Amino acid sequence: MFMSQLSEKKRQDEYNTRLASAVLKAEAAAKEATKNKTLEIAMTMLKRKYGINEIISICSLSSKEVLKLKASLEKG
């Protein structure tokens, strides 16, 4: 009986580990998608001649990120 309980505990621990890993991967993917969408919105705002401070405020990006986007937009 004791071995059976240990075996079940081990299976449950392995399941929980796989589940936690899947959740972390899903959260990372969602965060990346959100970041990509935010950068896309910021790029559109730059194209429409919004000010850098407006973009920083609305998109919650750093000035470094916005200036980097602006430089890439100017390069073509």
Image: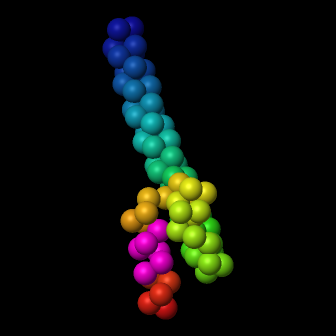
Residue at x 43% of width, y 63% of height: 63
Check residue 39 for magenta coloring. Answer: no
What x and y, as percent, mark residue 4? 39, 15
Question: Where does the image place residue 15, in percent across and percent down from the top left?
Answer: 45, 33
**Residue in the foreground of this view, choosing between 34 and 72:** 72
Residue 16 picture location, percent across and down: 45, 31
Looking at the picture, tell me which residue is in the foreground, 7 or 33.
33
Give whichever of 4, 53 is nearer the camera: 53
Can residue 27 be seen here? The reply is: yes
Residues in magenta, as a range: 66-71
The residue lying at 51 percent from left, 46 percent from top is: 27
State the predominant SS element of the stretch in magenta: helix
| Residue 34 seen from this side | no
Residue at 59%, 62% in the rendered image: 54
Quarter-wise, where is residue 43 in the image?
A: bottom right
* Residue projecting furthest to the bottom: 76
Q: Nearer the viewer, residue 49 or 9?
A: 49
As displayed, is residue 30 above or below residue 44? Answer: above
